[in-house]
Image: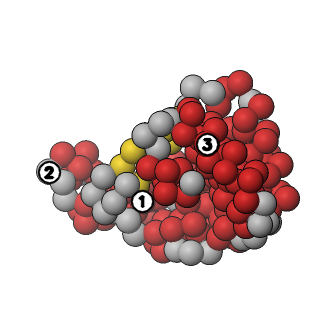
Amino acid sequence: IYYNALRYNDYAVARNSLYKMMAINPSNLALADTLAMLYLDQNQYSSALILTNDILSVNAADQFAMEVNGFCYEQLGFKQEALTRYESLHLATNRIDILYKIAFLQFQLNKLAEATASADIVLQDESSSGLKISFPIDQTRVQEVPMHASIYNLKGLIAQAQEQKEEAIGHFEKALELAPEFSVAQQNL
């Protein structure tokens, strides 16, 4: 029923079938993870958040649940909670993309020294050099830029927040050197 419901794009029936499977096998956390992903796909962040909190209360090391949980907190505007969850996930996985998210959340929470330290670690990590990030250009379009360009843009924003105009300009210019068409960095410069 679940697979047929997905095939026919009937998410209500798919969720219902997952609930039935969970009732039959309540200890199977993979079913709860699948339900969380279904909620996430439908932008039902509150439901996914509650479900992943339940998953984490049973298995605090569930990395998928940690990531979905952090993302849901972020989407719902609970930045400190998202930061806390992402920090736990980063400690468990050492994933550079999670540290990237952490740096931006630290900046948004005005933790500028921490954001700078996280940004510097991302720049120094060799695995981040080939990664790309999508940035919204407007309501319907996104632009893909190298992660390092995005991090230099962030460092520019941090310097700007600290009223270090020349340093901010240098970081924005470095971002544009790496991605000349990076519209966010162009606007910031």
Residue in the picture at 50% in, 35% down: 179
In contact (CB < 8 Å): disc 2 and disc 1: no
Q: Earlier in the sequence, mark 3 or mark 1?
A: 1
Observer-nearest of 84 and 173: 173
Observer-nearest of 150 and 79: 150
Q: Position of residue 154 (x, y in %)?
A: 65, 52
Residue in the picture at 23% in, 50% down: 6
Query: Does residue 150 appear left or right of residue 93 in this picture?
Result: left
Categorize mark 3 by other alpha carbons within 10 Å: few (<14), some (14-19), many (20+): many
Query: Can residue 156 be seen in this snapshot?
Result: yes
Residue placed under numbered mark 1 in the picture? 40
Q: Which marked residue is nearer to the observer: mark 2 or mark 3?
A: 3
Query: Does residue 187 appear left or right of residue 112 in this picture?
Result: left
Q: Is residue 29 above or below residue 179?
A: below
Q: Is residue 126 above or below residue 96?
A: above
Residue placed under numbered mark 3 in the picture? 173
Q: Position of residue 20 (x, y in %)?
A: 36, 62
Residue placed under numbered mark 2 in the picture? 8
Query: Does residue 128 appear left or right of residue 15 in this picture?
Result: right
Residue in the picture at 56% in, 75% down: 77
Q: Position of residue 147 (x, y in %)?
A: 58, 38
Amino acid bearing label 2: Tyr
